[in-house]
Image: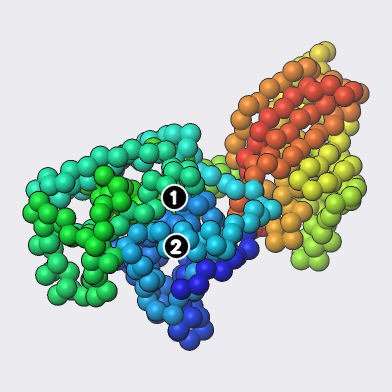
Amino acid sequence: MTFLPAEPNTGIRFRRVDLEGKPEIEARAEFVSATNRSTSLSKGHAKIHTVEHVLAAFAGARIDNAIIELDSNEPPIADGSAREYVKMIKAAGIVAQNELREVFTVETPISYENDETTISVLPHKGLKISCTSADKKGRYTQFFSIEVTPETWERELAHARTFCFFEEIEYLIKNGLIKGGTLENAVVIRDDAILTTEPLRYAEEFVRHKILDIIGDFSLVGAPINAHIIAVRPGHAANCEVARLINMQMRKPTEAAQSFAPPPSPPTPKTEVEAGAAIKDGDVLDTIRLMKILPHRYPFLMVDKITKIDGNKITGVKNITVNEPYFQGHFPNHPIMPGVLQLEAIAQVAGVLMLKQAENFGKLAYFMAAESVKWRKPVRPGDVLIIEVELTKSRGKIGKAKGTCLVDGEAVSEAEVTFMLIDR
């Protein structure tokens, strides 16, 4: 097995170098094919078994992008923990990448129950896991709770070895599930005795290994998560099912945006899109060029000009004249620019910045959400609205930005906006 670096937004992928074409399998819940004693992934004719310990090593170290090359259908078991994989990662080193890291925060509690297994996922600022482990007879019941960080992962969890009960061994051998199993890479529990080649590494080694499995299986969500996971007698099948439920919650904002968004405009000729979208740092974009990037038109184009583009920051200008159509009703004899249109101006300027990336040429930016919105002063005819936006997060099709509208150097409104890119 070899760990290789990968470009931003690659995710974690397994590559079978022993198969023709070197097929890859993304470490995502949709590719889970089996969960009997371990987690297996498959895509086409390629399969990988027992991926959870390797995935836990990457998730615990907060590594989002890597290629795992294998010349077999299973990673080397090592000592049954993630310790050797952690050593490989530390020896190679970790490099920060330019893309911002998008962490999904669970907003609504998720509950799963099947037979004697229950898993709850609750909102939390970080990643916390509380787990109770026991066999069907209630033997060796253990509980452990931990805030998972790279430091606590390596110190408190990574060394916990896999284990099984003695009476399970015959079944596992007959079904080919422990072909490489020995006391060198697993702990065996027989009645009140613990069979191992070395003393237990933790007093609660069994439940800590269950937490290790949870971290590996839940990484199949495809993004780091903030949540408090409370698990009683978890297993790979339950872990992977809850990962799918989290995926469903992640998709809800996207589905809502698609449900409430207007129908896309007719396809724009490729040459026009490319001519307008090929923007770079230092460019100044007039209205004509802006209309080749943004789909908005009168009376809903809320930016007249882009005056500055610098990395993740952009500045736009909107000249507020008395001829704006909304002044007829907002308000008669006391014209004020609606605050929501200032919010729209922030979203449009943020969309230009997101569309600056070459891979986003020709896409549309749909406004999804706004947070921390504040309107500080009224904006009236004759004012020049300066819109300053900084892209704070970008992951795949979702972007997040912080924007401020100013008049005469004074902030009149501000907000954090979230938007989604879709094809025209």
Give the percent coordinates (x, y) of residue 36.
24, 64
User: For the residue marked with disc 1, what is the amino acid?
Assistant: Glu
Q: Which residue is mark 1?
A: 154
- 203 with respect to 66 (left or right): left
User: For the residue marked with disc 2, what is the amino acid?
Assistant: Tyr
Q: Nearer the viewer, residue 154 or 384?
A: 154
Give the percent coordinates (x, y) of residue 158.
39, 53
Task: Answer whether labels 1 and 2 touch (C-beta < 8 Å).
Answer: no
User: Of all residues shown, which one is farthest toward the top?
Assistant: 333
Q: Nearer the viewer, residue 398 or 236?
A: 236
Question: On screen, 247 above or below 68?
Answer: above
**Residue located 40% across and 59% down the image:** 83
**Residue 371 seen in the figure:** yes
- Helix, strand or loop under label 1: helix
Q: Which residue is mark 2?
A: 85
- Helix, strand or loop under label 2: helix
